Amino acid sequence: MSSTFATEHTTFSPDSPGGPSAPAPRLDIKRMLRQNLRLIAGVFLGLSIPLSTAVWFLTPKAYNVYAELRFQADQVRIMDDVVSRNSSQFKQWLDTQIGLITGPAVLTKVLSKPAIRALPLIAAQADPLRFMQENLQTDTKGNSELVRVSIRLQDKQAAKLIIGEIIDEYTTLAKASEADTNADKRGAINGMLDKVRAELEHQHNRVDIVLKNLNVPLSDPSQIGGEDEMTSYRDQHALASTEMSKAKQNKALLESRTATFEEAKALYAKDPNTSIYEEGIEEMVSRDPGIQYLEAELIRLQTESQTKRESLREAHPDIKDFQRRLDVIQGKLTTAKSEIRGKRISEVEARLRQDIDIAARTLAETEERTESFRKTIDDHNREQIKASPEIEQFRDATAEIDKLSTQKKDLELRQAELDLE
């Protein structure tokens, strides 16, 4: 039986019958490195440069292609029937549009196009929809109304084609949805108009029956005592009723705008740096000469700072000085926006209250005029045909005709507005 022993430097076996064995040769790594250091270093440097170059050229390039969409906060017409929104409603609505752009509703239609299916990078995917969603990115640019839709692919032309098709499909979907919504509205309005016209005809028939019972020619109801004069009163009453209806709508709209603005004002009170889009506040802030000057100065410093950074190290005093100046300008800009925003909020609030006061006075005046004409007409009717059992039917029918006529005009106005969209 034999054993092998090892020390730090030598490996040997116990004596054998043949006599002591010779020491085994050993590999001295340190000595080898010392003797061949220059050769090793030369080989390493000689290989590292071409290998690095090969890796650089063999790594496939990726191209980032993007398009921008603008979604107006004041007048939103795509995929919705709401004319104006407050800040939180606009954010929720915008998230929905982004979800549509990056979701199956749009991407499935894009992938169904022959030109897209024929792209090698799409044809090579087991799940093209998932591949598209993983490489598609959306980004909202701060507090602006712009949304950037981008895709990063190794094929630049394919990326351009895909982005273009995505934007086209979303726009088509949006317009189709809006058209469907307007068609539904138009159908509903036409239905209401038909009912109002039928009811108007019924009420006119009631009036004709009353006039016939009173032995008054149907072609000339003015023969009821004083009707020549009363025709003018009725015309003025109808005009006053229309003006009263418009005044009510205007006052209600102003009150609704004021309530929404109060919510935005409360947000500003909590955080003066909050962007307020209601009543065009942010647009007024951005047009302020002082704000425009500070924003231009900030851009100038950012440009100069970037130029410095390209030639100096981060720790260089000039870089730190530029950063300090940038921070100062940014702070001034934030403070100035907050102050201007507060002033514009106060101005708009005062204007809205003034507009509501004017609308309230206008409404009161039209109501008084309408009531005056109605009272004159009622007094006349009571005096002229108070003995007739048909008086109540006549008065009810004419009043109903006035009301229905106003409804008919309002519906026709709404119908005309839809035709213009």
Image: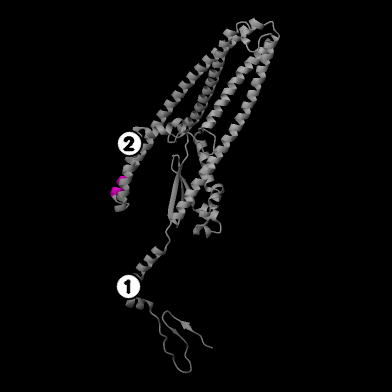
Magenta span: 317-323
SS assignment at label 1: helix
N-term-proximal mark, 2 vs 1: 1
Magenta span contains residue 322: yes
Where in the figure is residue 290, as x and y percent of width and height?
34, 33
Q: Is residue 406 left or right of residue 24?
A: right
Picture residue at 66% right of the left edge, 6% below the top: 385
State the image coordinates of residue 244 (x, y, percent, origin top left): 54, 18
Q: Position of residue 140 (x, y in %)?
A: 46, 43
| Residue that numbered label 2 is attached to | 293
As shown in the figure, which amino acid type bears the numbered disc 1? Gly
Quarter of the image holding residue 26? Answer: bottom left
Q: The disc labelled 2 sits on which kind of residue?
A: Tyr
Nearer mark to the viewer, of 2 and 1: 2
Residue 248 lies in the magenta stretch: no
SS for dot 2: helix
Q: Residues within 10 Å of mark 2 (few under 14, many from 20)?
A: few
Q: Which residue is mark 1?
A: 42
Q: Is residue 370 visible?
A: no
User: Residue at image x 35%, y 76%?
Assistant: 33
Horizontal placement of 225 versus 252: left or right? right
- Residue 38 found in image quarter: bottom left
- Choose between 154 and 358: the one closer to the eye: 154
User: In x, y percent, where is residue 169?
Assistant: 52, 46
Q: Exactly how many numbered labels are in the figure?
A: 2
- For the residue pair 84 and 285, the one nearer the viewer reads as 84
Q: Residue pushed farthest bottom?
A: 18
